[in-house]
Every structure is written in C-alpha cells, then in structure tokens.
Amino acid sequence: MAADQLLRIGAFARRVGMEPTTVRAWERRYGLPRAARTVGGQRLYDEEAVRDVRRARRLVEQGWSVHRAARKVAAEARARASGAASDASRVELLRKADVALDAVEVFALVREAVESLEPAELLDEVVEPLLATGPGRLVDEILGAHLLALCRPPEGPAGEVVIAAPLVGRSALVGAAALALTGNGYVAVPLGDGADLVAAARLAEGLSARLVVALGPGDRAVAGDALASLPASSTAVEQLVLEIPDSTSHVAPADGVHHGPLRTLGAAPASS
C-alpha cells in the first residue's frame, strides 16, 4: 500500500467501527492491529490491519472472547509476516526449542498457542501432532501444565472421569485428555503420569467414575503388566483406553479403545 494510502488512527478506527482509544488498547494488550509509525510516532495502518481487526470482531460476534480472538488473529498476522504457516510452525518451533533445552522459548511458544487458539483447535493443530511423535521432556511438562490450567468445571457435568497414564513423561497426554473431557461435559480427575492403575481403578470405583487409561505411542508394549493388573471389565468401573498412535501407524479398532480426534474423547456418539 502506498504511503499516501495508509490510514491514520482516526480514519482506521472509523473503518473498523471502533474508538481510537480501543484501537490503542488492543494494540497494547494483544499486538493487534499492527501499525507502522511515522518519524513523529504517529500510527499508520494498511488494509491488512483493517481485515485483521474485522476478522477478530467477527470471531467475537461468534462467541469468542475479545482476548482469544485478538490473540489468534495477531498470531496469524505475525505468521503471515514471516511467511510461515502458524500451526505447522508452532509445532516445529516447539520441537526445536525442546531439543535446545530452551525452557523460556518453550514456555513462550506454548503460552502463545494457548492464548491464540480455542481448545479444540489447540488439541487438533498443536497437541495431537506433538503427541504422535513425542513432545520432548520440556514441552511435555510445560504444555501439560497449561492444558490442565485450561480445564474448567462444566455446568451440569455428565459425571467424573479419572485419568491415569502408567508411564512417566505423559503430562501433555494427561492434560490433553482432561481438556477434551471437560470440553465434553465431564469433571476430570487427572492423576498424572506414572500412575498406579490399580489405585486409579479403586479411586474411580469409589467416585462412581469412569477410568481413562492414557497411552502414548508404543506405551502398550511397555505397560503390558500395568494394563494386565487392571480389574476385569465386569467391575463397576467403566474403562476406556486413550491410545495415541505414532505418526506412521494407527491403533487397531478394539472395544474400549477411543477412536477419533482427541477433542472427541468422552463426547456422546452422533445419532444416526
């Protein structure tokens, strides 16, 4: 856009239907809209900035919070400016930061993804690709903590679900299961990774809850003894195995094993 076609803040605010003070507040809080500056410090906006703010406002009209909508569109704008696809680059950058043992960068990337994406998008576009290839220790711990922090008790819950992973290093998997279950109407009771499955089954029975056993790629072969120690399915505990396949294989269909995207864990089956 030619310099003489750039919009000053007053004209920009009128184009997007906002007050100039609100435009400044959005830029300060969310990094949206992106503005150039004159030598004197005055903001100048192009047509992409107009489209970005209008997109964020449409998301708000669809039920998104202002915070999440603006953060999401701001992240898309940054990715567009760098020529990268936002979701693919997030996953790749997280892997690189984990290999470099850069905890600060991992935290910043996870925080940006959590603030920019809705829970279902986060599970589909970031969490599942990471789990399929192994997230790495730092990503596992930091992402797992953020996923659990996103869980909110549902109104009129369908029941409680105890979540247990028999192997260590599965914090993100447990957090993802908890986020999916709360999104589908359950109260999640995450026991974490390295959990004793017999104790988890007893807790589930005491709570009259379901039990979800969370397995990452290749875990079934390693955790065979722990799985064999579970009470028989004829007990009062309804058991469900959440098993993540690796990126080159799939989990064979079987009764009691969750199939489909993570976000559908615990969801009522679609009526035919």
Image (cartoon, rainbow, N blue to C red):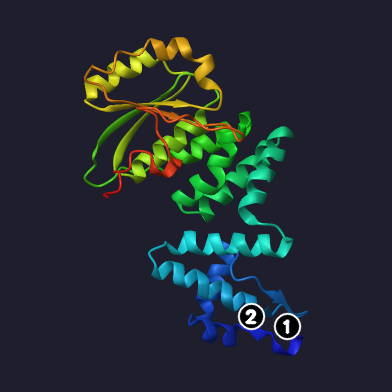
To which residue does mark 2 refer? 47
* Amino acid of disc 1: Met
Q: Nearer the viewer, residue 61 or 17?
A: 61
- Residue 9 locus on image (x, y percent): 60, 82
Q: Secondary structure at mark 2?
A: helix
Q: How many marks?
A: 2
Q: Nearer the viewer, residue 4 or 95?
A: 95
Q: Residue at x 50, y 69 (%)?
A: 56
Q: Quadrant of the N terminus?
A: bottom right
What is the residue that sits farthest to the right in this orientation?
39
Image quarter of residue 239: top left
Q: Residue at x 41, y 41 (%)?
A: 179
- Residue 73 locus on image (x, y percent): 56, 64
Q: Is residue 16 above or below residue 214?
A: below
Q: Is residue 163 above or below residue 183?
A: above
Q: Secondary structure at mark 1?
A: loop
Horizontally, residue 130 falls left or right of residue 69, namely right
Q: Nearer the viewer, residue 93 or 28?
A: 93
What is the residue that sits farthest to the bottom in this orientation?
4
* Amino acid of disc 2: Glu
Horizontally, residue 5 falls left or right of residue 189, namely right
- Residue 228 locus on image (x, y percent): 40, 11
Q: Is there a contact, CB below 8 Å, between mark 2 and mark 1?
A: yes
To which residue does mark 1 refer? 1
